[in-house]
Image (cartoon, helix red, strand yellow):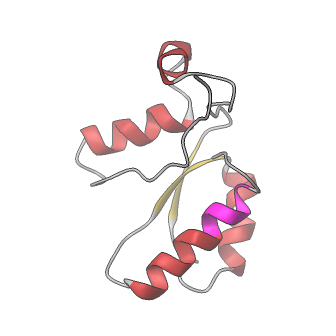
Amino acid sequence: MGGDNAPASVIDGADIARAKSPHIEVLFVGDKAVISPLLAKSKHVKGADVIHTESAVSSQETASQAVRRGRESSMWLAIAEVAANRADAIVSAGTLAH
């Protein structure tokens, strides 16, 4: 789970979204050892599930490079969750690489 000030900023954003829309369910994909303590400090996403991976798409990779690189990246695993109908959508800050 990448992005500026991530994963804390991502979890903070999800916490705000869940406060405004308590009916949504949130699933995080990333390093569980890093994400779980941050979730424990949150108010609205405290019990969210985490799919563990230590592989993330770097800000220097293009989308096509990330897809070719591996099936263990956080983005690949998030896409797999949607494909398997275990998630409805992906929210990502995305990569700035061209």
Q: Is residue 79 above or below residue 86?
A: above
Q: Is residue 15 left or right of residue 18?
A: right
Camera-side residue of 39 and 8: 8
Residue 39 horizontal/vertical position (percent):
65, 71
- Quarter location, residue 65: top right
Q: Is residue 78 above or below residue 43?
A: above
Farthest left residue in view: 85
Q: Is 42 part of what is drawn in magenta?
A: no
Q: Looking at the figure, which quarter contains the C terminus?
A: top right
Does residue 8 appear to the left or right of 13 in the view shown? right
Q: Nearer the viewer, residue 5 or 26?
A: 5
- Residue sitting at x 47%, y 77%: 17
> Where's residue 96, x and y in %?
61, 34
**Residue at the location (65% across, 80% down)?**
42
Q: Residue lying furthest front in this view?
A: 98
Image coords of residue 49 (percent x, y)? 50, 62
Q: Looking at the magenta stretch, what is its main secondary structure?
A: helix
**The quarter of the displayed image where residue 16 is located:** bottom right
Q: Which residues are magenta?
A: 6-11
Q: Residue at x 68, y 59 (%)?
A: 35
The residue that appears at 31% across and 81% down in the rendered structure is: 23
- Is 29 located above or below residue 70 in the figure? below
Q: Position of residue 94 (x, y in %)?
A: 54, 41
Count of picture labels: 0
